[in-house]
Amino acid sequence: MRVPGRIGLAAGAVGVGAAVLFAVVRLVPSDPAEPPAPGPSATGRIVPATVAPLPPSTPVRLDVPRIGVRTALMKLAKNPDRTVETPPLARAGEAGWYRLGPAPGSRGAAVIIGHVDSQRGPAVFYRLGELRPGDRFSVRRADGRTAVFRVDSVERVPKDRFPTERVYADPGYPAIRLITCGGRFDRGTGHYVDNVIAYGHLLGASAAKR
């Protein structure tokens, strides 16, 4: 989401903000009592059409046409304090796949993380908040398949109320979440106060190239 006036902040302040944008993200068990919906809905649970999941395969590229994103995907894991890694600020123009979770297209919630900005200006997910339900995007995988996803919903949430289960728990179908930071930039703490999360599900995939 565009955050007016934040790009011009001092390099140190913006750098710290981007570096800690996922400080509240924690892993959760993969089998909660009730699988969460892919995103909030005013009319109830979103139930996407059933599509057979793909076998696991490393994602290598993300394309989101509406917001002009075309990026290679690095692999992310966990920090020593068990928070989720983010891409290094030196590569703020690239997004990263959380490799300890499902691969995009496989059953479960695949997670892709990117910065909103850095001291050099807008980063890969600067416009993530502009996505709307129905938008389509794709992930190219190492097995040659391109998995196509549909956006179900987009929300902005305070970091101290991050919806951990809704993001990470297995909803029972191939799902995906794109995450960045957003909202107001807090000069006192040096980071944004919210996260922007786009929820989606698999529509289908091209055949693997031989």
Image (spheres, helix red, strand yellow):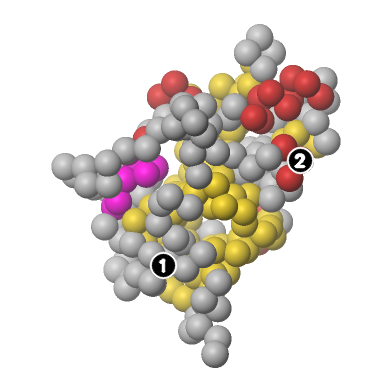
Q: Secondary structure at mark 1?
A: loop
Q: Which mark is residue 56?
A: 1
- Image coordinates of residue 7 in percent, x first then y, are 79, 29
Q: What residue is disc 2 on?
A: 90
Q: For this rendering, which residue is in front, 72 or 181?
A: 72
Q: How many marks?
A: 2
Q: For this rendering, which residue is in front, 27 or 2?
A: 27
Residue depicted at x 53% and y 42%: 179
- Image coordinates of residue 177 in percent, x first then y, are 47, 49
Residue depicted at x 62% and y 57%: 73
Residue depicted at x 31% and y 67%: 49
Q: Is residue 196 left or right of residue 107?
A: right
* Badge 1 density bin: few <14, some 14–19, many ≥20, Cα 10 Å: some
Mark 1 to mark 2 CA distance (whole Å): 29 Å
User: Seen from this angle, which residue lies furthest bottom?
Assistant: 210
Tags 1 and 2 touching, CB below 8 Å: no
- Callout 1 amino acid: Pro
Q: What are the residue bounds of the magenta stretch?
A: 165-171
Q: Which mark is residue 204?
A: none
Residue 174 vs 76, above or below: the answer is: below
- Callout 2 amino acid: Ala
Residue 189 vs 117, above or below: the answer is: above
Residue 182 vs 166, above or below: the answer is: above
Q: Secondary structure at mark 2?
A: helix
- Image coordinates of residue 45 in percent, x first then y, are 27, 48
Q: Is residue 190 left or right of residue 173?
A: right
